Each structure stands twice: as structure tokens, then as C-alpha cells.
Amino acid sequence: MTKEFDLIQTDRIIEMAWEDRTSFEAIEFQFGITESEVIEVMRRALKPSSFRVWRKRVNSSVSKKHLMKRNPEIERFKCTRQRTISHNKISKR
């Protein structure tokens, strides 16, 4: 069962899920939801085509969504040079 989030929290989860450098563990640390719950949030919030693109991207070998696949020298959740985004530009239903 997935937790309920307000619009701002949902937008932030979607933003973090799209960000390659943000691991599922970072999302779990901030929002208390597992990878499968993140997938459920994405499935409910995105258009079906956007969800498929995201899943394909996350499952690719390029993705660093899991800490175990990531370079061990990267110890932060967020790049120090990353700009904050004021709103979510990902297409939603």
C-alpha cells in the first residue's frame, strides 16, 4: 500500500525519480517509501507513455538509481551544482 502525498511532495518524488543522480535510497530516506512504492507513485502520476520511458531509463545500464551500481566515491544525494527546480516539467495525467 502506497502512502498518500500532497501535490508538492508528489512533484518532488517525480523530480527525484527522473534525476539520474538521485538514488531510490535517497527517495526512501526523504519520503520513507521503497522503490516499489516510487514506481507506484510514478505509475499513478505520469501518462502511460511517460511512465514507460521512465521505466526503460531506470532499467538501463546507464541509470545510477541504485547505490550499489553507483561509483562509491559519490556520497551525496544531490550534486552541489544542481539547481533547484521550482516546478515539475514532466508530463502528468
Image (tube, rainbow, N blue to C red):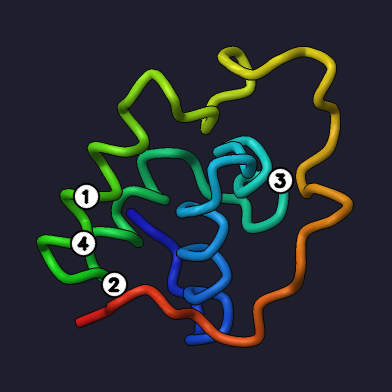
- Please tell me which of labels 2 and 3 falls first in the chain: 3
Residue at horizontal 54 percent and vertical 25 percent from the top: 66
Q: Mark 3 sits on what residue?
A: 29
Q: Amino acid at mark 1?
A: Val
Q: Do labels 4 and 3 touch, CB within 8 Å?
A: no
Q: Amino acid at mark 2?
A: Ala
- Of residues 72 and 81, the one drawn nearer to the viewer in this rendering: 81
Q: Mark 2 sits on what residue?
A: 45
Q: Amino acid at mark 3?
A: Phe
Query: Where's the C terminus, which quadrant?
Result: bottom left
**Mark 1 residue element:** helix
Q: Do labels 1 and 2 touch, CB within 8 Å?
A: no
**Disc 2 and disc 3: Cα gap in Å?**
21 Å
Residue 76: where, in percent of width, then height?
84, 37
- Please tell me which of labels 4 and 3 falls first in the chain: 3
**Disc 1 and disc 3: Cα gap in Å?**
25 Å
Q: Mark 4 sits on what residue?
A: 50
Up/down of 86 relative to 90, above or below:
below
Q: Mark 1 sits on what residue?
A: 53
Q: Do labels 4 and 1 touch, CB within 8 Å?
A: yes
In this view, the residue farthest toward the front is 81
**Disc 4 and disc 3: Cα gap in Å?**
25 Å
Residue at horizontal 11 percent and vertical 61 percent from the top: 49
**Mark 2 residue element:** helix
Residue 80: where, in percent of width, then height?
88, 51
Determine which quarter of the picture holds residue 25. top right
**Disc 1 and disc 2: Cα gap in Å?**
14 Å
